[in-house]
Structure formats: C-alpha cells, structure tokens
Image: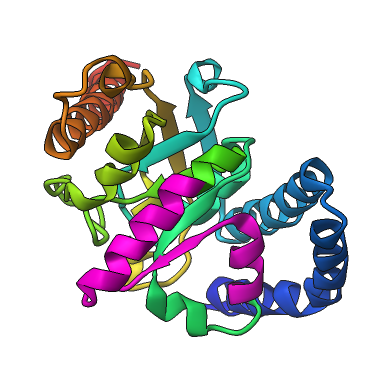
Amino acid sequence: MLRTFIWYMYFFGYLVVVSPLLLKAHRLKKQGKKEELDTFIRTISGNWARRLIKLAGGKVSVIGAERIPKNEPLLIVSNHQGNFDIPVLLGYLGINMGFISKVEVKKIPLIRSWMIFMGCVFMDRKDRRQAVKAIKQGAESFQHGQNLVIFPEGTRSKGGPVAPFKKGSFKLATKSGVTILPVTINGSYKLMEANNNLMTPGSVVVTVTEPIRCHQTDETVDAQQLADLSRTQIMNALEDKQEHVTEELSSPV
C-alpha cells in the first residue's frame, strides 16, 4: 500500500515540478528546433517513465532493439497488457514516440500538454468523422518523422489472451506507407493489474520483432492483413518467451 501511495505522489508530483519546462518546449517549437525539442521531450518523458517503473519495483529488459529501423518514421504496434505498457515503451525503446490515444485523456491537465509535444493523436472512437480526421492527422505526421504507437486490441488484456487486432488504426500504414514495428510486451500487468491495482514488483520483457514493409511494395495488402500479420508476430514472440520461462522453471537445479 505504501509503495502505491508513493508511486501516485511521484506520478503527479513530477508533472507539477517539470511543468515550467513546458515554456522551454514552447520556445524550441517556435524556433523550429525540432531535433533539440525531440531530445528534450524524450529526456523528460523517458526519465518520468523509468522512475515510475522503478518505484513500482519493476525491471525491464529489451530483446531485439537492434531491429528498430533508424532514420525513418515508424508505426509501433504493441499488445496491451496493462497501464505500465506506456511507461515501458517510453522508457526503454530509446526513440521518440507519440501515442494514438482516446480523446478523454486530452482533458487531463499537465499530461495533455506533454502529450501534444510528444506528437500524440487523440481519437474519439464514438465519433466516426473525428476518428477519420485523427487517422489522417496521424498519417500526415509521419511525413515529419513522427513515430506513433497503437494498441490495436483496444483494451488491456491484464495478462489474458491477446485479443484480435482492430484494423482501423492500420489505415495509418496503408495511407502513408510507413514501416510497421510490432513490439511484444510480456509481464507489465504484474506490476499493477495482477494485484488489485496495487504496485507490485515484477519483471517485464519487451521483444522487438521484425519490421513489416510488405504494404510498401504490394498495394493489395490491406489494413486487415497488416493487423493479422502484426498480431501473429506479437503472439509468436509472446509464446516463445512463455515457453522459455516454463523450461527454466521445470529444469532441475
């Protein structure tokens, strides 16, 4: 209980303490210093994310970081086990990223401002017209080197099976031709959801799988096919890791 209390104090306290730095972010954006702004935002958000995980007692390891393409925008596709998925990706992939987020998050003070600078796109799933505009906005952002993250299950699995991927967000790829990077997160739910939302120490493994580019050379590849292919890669990596853990547990000492 104490760990959880400290965690929430830090969660909001850090945002308050660094809020004056939003002025620097505004200045860098106004001056057109995109590279410097990206580094600044990545530092602020990354530090926040890693400390949140440390305070929860979490440890994160990344497999396959060498597969992350350099010098091109990415649509990062991930399974969604729990609330810690966002800090895990922010803190440990080592690249700038924004998120396709539900529009309700935009109403949260402080968080909203940082998300805008991160390049997040807010989507109202109940408003089809707004959702279409959000997809267009996201697709256009790739032209400026923006990386975006989607959780196409649409909800947290909390350690359960990976749900079917909704194809809507994959229109970001079919419209823009951006490279898709499927990423598997295994264990994030153990830090919070597995213990009635109380912070609990645990290990998280992030596996970066092979980039998907088939839609760049084959115009017949549609959003549903990209959703299915991404899900298959993510599930294969998740199953491989679970089998490895089972083998370790069953091995004689």
Where is residue 45 shown, x and y percent of the image?
68, 56
Task: Identify the residue at horizontal 48%, vertical 17% (top origin).
Answer: 67
Q: Is residue 27 above or below residue 19?
A: above
Q: Is residue 195 above or below residue 57?
A: below
Asked whether 196 or 108 is in front, the reply is: 108
Q: Is residue 160 above or below residue 238?
A: below
Task: Identify the residue at horizontal 58%, vertical 75% (top origin).
Answer: 112
Q: Is residue 125 visible?
A: no
Total marks shown come to: 0
Q: In the drawing, does residue 68 fall left or right of residue 153?
A: right
Magenta region: which residues? 111-140
Prevailing secondary structure of the magenta residues: helix
Q: Is residue 20 visible?
A: yes
Where is residue 201 shown, x and y percent of the image?
49, 54
Which quadrant is home to the C terminus?
Answer: top left
Asked whether 200 or 145 is in front, the reply is: 145
Residue 225, image quadrant: top left
Q: Does the magenta-highlighted stretch encompass residue 116? A: yes
Task: Identify the residue at horizontal 86%, vertical 76% (top origin).
Answer: 20
Q: In the drawing, does residue 243 fall left or right of residue 86?
A: left
Q: Does the magenta-highlighted stretch encompass residue 250? A: no
Task: Identify the residue at horizontal 78%, vertical 41% (top origin).
Answer: 35
